[in-house]
Image (spheres, helix red, strand yellow):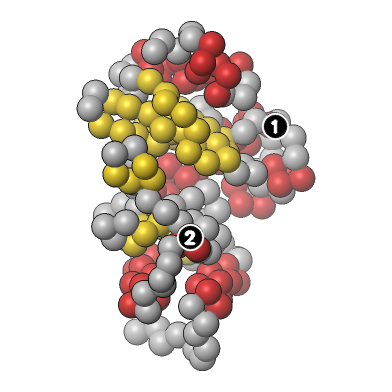
Amino acid sequence: MLWEDKEIESLVFDRRSLDILARIIKKGIIDRLIGKISEGKEASVYLATKDELYRAVKIYKPETSKFFNSRYKYVGKKGDEMELAIHYARKEYKNMEKLHSIINIPEPIYCEGNILVMEFLGKDGIPYPQLYRVKPIQEEWFDEIIKMVKDMYKIGYVHGDLSPYNILVGDKIYFIDFGQSVTIKDPRFRELLNRDVSNIARFFNKEGPIEWD
């Protein structure tokens, strides 16, 4: 499947993103798009292939919305729609580069424009399920997740948007979606850390303070 195909054009929501995707394919980062994995307010994620391997392609949406216009709080700048989408993608890519050796996350592979290419987390083209979809819940997962939060904290990072929707359960527990992650230098660091922990504790029906070693 070539990037010019109508099938790919119908998957991608604007011409500028399609042009960037064309360059990524021509550089050999991916071979083809297969279909959409998920749709969010900020981005869409697609299943792609590279030789015999699956990859995930996240395309930030260069469009105006209430959510989009609030992004500058997290990326630290204002700009037009495409500039913000590009900045957001780069921010997530850099966060993932820093965190990949620290906790379980998709390996970041490439970033250009508003498009981020990463390792696909799943089996046979089927993505690992989000935590909120998995039954029954294993109590030991709570400790694994909090350990990952602590490991991020130790190097001065907080996820910033952690919830059962961006935790995947597969051969391991994985965190995804790092576009809103911040460092300890951010004045909202403690607030976001507390919110992340509260979200997870609430999901597992845990009460009481978390011990920080």
x, y percentage for residue 80? 70, 31
For disc 1, the marked residue is 63
The residue at the point 38 percent across, 20 percent down is 32
Q: Residues within 10 Å of mark 2 (few under 14, many from 20)?
A: few
Question: What amino acid does circle 2 point to?
Answer: Arg
Question: What amino acid does circle 1 point to?
Answer: Glu
| Placement of 187 over or under 66, stated as above or below | below
> In which quadrant of the rendered view does residue 140 lie?
bottom left
In-front residue for pair 91/174? 174
Q: Which mark is residue 133?
A: 2
| Placement of 140 over or under 110, stated as above or below | below
Q: How crowded is mark 1: few (under 14 residues within 10 Å), some or many (20 or more)?
A: some
x, y percentage for residue 128? 37, 51
What is the secondary structure assignment of the residue under circle 2? Answer: helix
Indicate which disc, 1 or 2, sits on the residue closer to the N terminus. Answer: 1
The residue at the point 69 percent across, 42 percent down is 68
Relative to residue 111, is residue 44 drawn left or right? Answer: right
| Placement of 169 over or under 54, stated as above or below | below
Residue 97 in sight in this render: no
Relative to residue 110, is residue 207 drawn left or right? Answer: right
Check the image and name the residue furthest to the front.
135
Tell me the quadrant of the picture where the N terminus can be found.
top left
Relative to residue 61, is residue 93 drawn left or right? Answer: left
The residue at the point 34 percent across, 84 percent down is 213
What is the secondary structure assignment of the residue under circle 1? Answer: loop
> In which quadrant of the rendered view does residue 88 lie?
top right
Of the residues tagged 1 and 2, which is closer to the observer? 2
Residues under labels 1 and 2: Cα distance? 29 Å
The residue at the point 57 percent across, 67 percent down is 192
Check the image and name the residue furthest to the left.
52
Q: How many labels does the image show?
A: 2
